[in-house]
Amino acid sequence: MNFSLAKQAVASVFHRLGRSQSSSYSTWTYPTTVNSTTPQFIVTPNNGFLPHSDPLERLPDDFHHLESLLQKMPLQIKTDSGSYKEGLLSEGNFGETLVKELPVYDVANITDSALLMALFRDYTFAASAYLLEPCDLGNRISGNFGIGRDHLPASIAVPLVKIANKIGAKPFMEYAQSYALYNYRRKDKSKPVTYDNLELIRQFSGLPSESGFILVHVDMVAKTKGVVEHVIGSLNAVAVNDRLNFNKHLRELVTVMKEINGCMEKMWKRSSPSDYLKFRTFILGTKNQMSIFPKGVEYRGTDLDGPQFFRGESGANDSIIPTIDNFLELTKKMPKNEMTNILKDFRSYRPLDHSNWLKWVEDSASELGIEKYAKLSTDSLQLYIMLLDEVRDFRTRHWNFAKEYIIKRTAYPTATGGSPMASWLPNQLYAVLRMLQDKSLVYRMMMEKEDPKLDEFVTKEYYNKISDQLQSLRKDMLSMEDIYGRYRK
Ligand code: HEM
C-alpha cells in the first residue's frame, strides 16, 4: 500500500515550518493503485464513500440460477415494450421457486473483490426477499406484517456467510455493500455518477420510486470525494497550525455539504412519499423487530450458532453525517443514552474501510482539538458553525422525510435499522440544535458582531430560528406519544 499524497503534503509543510508532527496524529492513507483483490470500498478523495470502480452489474454464467431468480423477483418488471408484468414476489412465489431452483454454489475460492461484492449484494437481496415475502403479502392484504420466515435455506445461507466472512460484513442486507452504494449502473460510461446518468441493478418492487429513493442516496454520495479531501485537508492543516489552510478546507466542506443537501432535497420529487411503504418492507432488519422475527433467523447449513439478529438496511449506515459529526467533535457531545448507543452500533454495519475512516476522523479530530482550534479564530468559528448548520439542515430535512414517508402512514414503531421511530432521529436533531444554542457558538458570535469580517450568517434572526426549531421539535416529540404511545424522554 502506498502512502497518500496528503501524507507527503503534510510532511513537506512540517519541513517548511521546522515543526515536528504531533506524536500520534498521522494522516489518512489509502492505496493509489488498485488490483482485483483490493476491496471495492476504500475511502479516498478520488471516490469518496462510493466503491472505487462501478458495481459489477451481472453475475457470470456460473451463477446463472441466482441471476435468473433475481431478474424474475421484483413485484413488477418492466418489459422491453415498456409495459409491466408481475414478478415472483407479486403473488408470493419467490421463496418456493428459490427452494426449487437455487443450488448451493461454491464460493470458497473466489478472491476477485468485484465478484465477491456483487455476490454479497445479490445473496442479501435474495435473503431479504425470502425472509420478508410473507410480510409484504400480509401488509398488502391486511395492513399487517405478520411473521417473517424464520430461516434461510442452505442455498442462500452457506454462500452468504462465506462471502460475508471474506469481506468482513454481517451476513445480511446492508446500505453500502448491497442495497444502495453497490447497486447502480452508469447509463453512459463516459459520463460521471450523477442522478440522470444512473439506473438500478437490483430492486424489490420495480417501482420508479424505489429507484428514485436509492439513486438519490448514490447521487449524494457521489459528491463525497470533496468531503474526504477537505476533512483530510482540515485535519492536516490543524496538525501544522496552518490557519489559512484550515479555513480554506472548512469553507470547501461547507460548500460540498450544501451541494449534498441540495441533492437530498430532490428526494421529494424523485421518490413519492405514498410509494415508500410499498418497498420498505423488504429492507427491514431482523434485530429489534420482535413481532416479525420473534425467534430471529436460522442460517441453515452454516456454523452460525443459533438464531441470528441483524439491523436492516438504513441510511444510518451512510458515512457522510457520521464523518461530519466526528470531525466537528459532535459525536462525543451526543447525550449518553440508549439512542446514542444505537448511533454507535450502526457504525459497525458498513464496509470495513468506512468504519476505519470514521474512527480515524473521530480520533484525529479529538486529538487535534478541532472545536477548540476553531474557537481560537472568529473566521474559523463562523465556518465551524456554518458546517454545523449543514448537519442541522440535513437532520431537519431528514426528520421531515421520516414524518411524511413513514410516521404519517404507519404506526409500526420500529425503523428498518431497528431504531425506535418516535425517538431516535429526534435524539440527534435535538443534540445538534442544543449545540447551536451553546453560549460558546452562535451566541458568542452574535455578541462579537461588530467584527466587520463577519458575514450575515450568525445573526439574532438565526439564533431565534434555532430556538423556534427546538420548540417545534419538542411539539413533534409530544405528538409521537399519541402515535406510538411509548415515547420516553
Ligand atoms: C424518503 C427518504 C428517507 C427516509 C424515509 C429515511 C428514513 C430513515 C429512518 C427511519 C432512519 C432511522 C434509522 C433506522 O433505520 O433505524 C434513518 C436514518 C438515517 N438516514 Fe435516512 N431516510 C431517508 C433518506 C435518507 C437519505 C437520502 C440519506 C442520505 C444519505 C439518509 C441518511 C440517513 C442517516 C445519516 C441516518 C442517521 C440519522 C442521524 O444520525 O441522526 N436518509 N433514515
Image: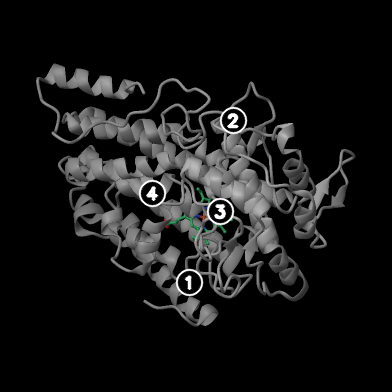
Say which residue appears at 63% left-offset and 38% top-offset. 184
Q: Of the residues tagged 3 and 2, which is closer to the observer?
A: 3
Q: At x 54% / y 32%, what residue is drawn?
A: 113
244 w.r.t. 16: above or below? below
| Residue position for label 3 | 172
Q: Is residue 77 left or right of residue 55?
A: right
Which class describes the residues within 10 Å of circle 3: few (<14), some (14-19), or many (20+)? many
Residue at mark 4: C-beta within 8 A of ligand 1:
yes
Amino acid beneath label 4? Pro
Res 422 label = 1
x then y, percent, for residue 331: 30, 54
The residue lying toward the viewer, choosing from 385 and 200, is 200
Contact (CB < 8 A) between labels 4 and 2? no
SS for callout 3: loop
Which of pointers 3 and 4 lies earlier in the amino acid sequence? 3
Image quarter in which the C terminus is found: bottom left
Q: Secondary structure at mark 4?
A: helix
Q: Earlier in the sequence, mark 3 or mark 2?
A: 2
Please give the name of the residue rendered at 21% of the width and 47% of the height, measured from the top-left corner.
Answer: 449
> Label 2 sits on what residue type?
Asp
Which mark identifies residue 159? none
Q: Nearer the viewer, mark 2 or mark 1?
A: 2
Q: Mark 2 highlights which residue?
A: 54
Q: Amino acid at mark 1?
A: Ala
Whole-angstrom CA distance, mark 3 to mark 4, is: 21 Å
Q: What is the x, y in percent for residue 439?
A: 20, 59
Q: Residues within 10 Å of mark 4 (few under 14, many from 20)?
A: many
